[in-house]
Amino acid sequence: MLTRRHFIEPDTFTLEEMETLFALAEKIEREGGYLRDSCKGKLLGVLFFEPSTRTRLSFEAAMIRLGGTCLGFAEPYSSSTAKGESLADTIRTVACYADAIVMRHPKEGAALLASRYSSVPVINAGDGGHHHPTQTLTDLLTIRQMRGAIDNLTIGFCGDLKFGRTVHSLARTLARYPRITMIFISPPELAMPSYITERFAGAGVSYEETGSLDTVIGKLDVLYMTRVQRERFFNEEDYIRLKDSYILNMEKMAMAKKDMMVLHPLPRVNEIAPDVDADPRAAYFRQATYGMYVRMALLSSVLGVVC
Ligand code: NCD
């Protein structure tokens, strides 16, 4: 039962609860009108204190397709945050008007704090360089759709693994699935934080770290590319030095398995050459579509219109 629960960290839901969400998302996709109007009369507070295209619009599209309505802001300067209002007070206020709140914020832990002040469910749409659990639902649904199951996979995470919240949430969640090998590909400065990897040792998760995409690409079933997170760097020189560490192009794709999937949470900057888009292994725009279906499943469950 996901009704009225917060969704802050990727471990919030059990694997069985996630399976239920994926099955529901697949049913919504298959049967065009399923759950249409089920959220009629419900309001979703959409509070984005950081830029977004896919996450915000897919949540809004999901709510509108379920017959509900969204209210909120896409940047904080148009809200009383600009006058110095605390996050706690903003949340307490929006909870008076909305049935659930989706929130993105530049500070790690902001969604958890919001959940402590909210009388309605809070969904974390990204808290700084920490977590992004609904992107994980999107990523896993995409893998499930394209490979049939989330099992027996070698997945490479490539790019900014230090600040990339989508990789933190996805790696932590994949560690709960059977027969998963993770390969973390990054320059040493952008390596996966130890607060993620230290959990793996005890859980018997198989992983390795490398600086070279070329040497491992041939082993991968899934390649998860990421953008170097400019906004989280302390200085511009470091960003400029590291931003083009990895560029996936057709030359590299030629070294990969014929059925390797390329995922990317998007936005892409330079890390995937545009001609890769035409390769059938490039799944990132399909991934964006699944993001809407899985958010429809999540919202209908959290708002209690399905059990
Ligand atoms: C990601 C994010 O915001 O963390 N985008 C997304 O939600 N799809 C990845 C990124 O910004 O690089």
Image (cartoon, helix red, strand yellow):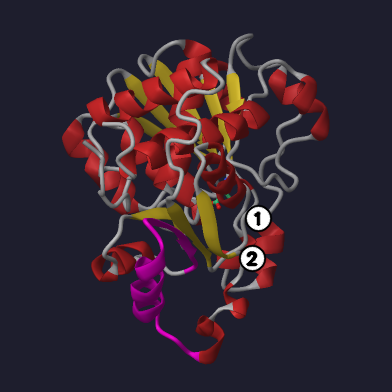
Q: Residue at coordinates 64% horizontally, 65% vertically from top-left? A: 238
Quadrant in the rendering for residue 13: top left
What secondary structure is found at the residue carrying circle 2? helix
Q: Which amino acid, mark 1?
A: Leu
Q: Residue furthest right?
A: 275
Q: Would you say the beta carbon of the disc 1 residue lies within 8 angstroms of ligand 1?
A: no
Q: Position of residue 84 (x, y in %)?
A: 48, 90
Q: Say which residue label 2 marks.
A: 238
Q: Say which residue label 1 marks.
A: 242
Q: Which amino acid, mark 2?
A: Asp
What secondary structure is found at the residue carrying circle 1? helix
Give above or below for 151 relative to 175: above
Q: Is residue 140 magenta?
A: no
Q: Is residue 306 left or right of residue 80?
A: left
Q: Residue at coordinates 76% horizontally, 29% vertically from top-left? A: 249
Q: Residue furthest left?
A: 202
In the image, the segment drawn in magenta is 84-106
Q: Residue furthest bottom?
A: 83
Q: Are marks 1 and 2 in contact (CB under 8 Å)?
A: yes
Give above or below for 163 relative to 137: below
Q: Position of residue 118 (x, y in %)?
A: 29, 66
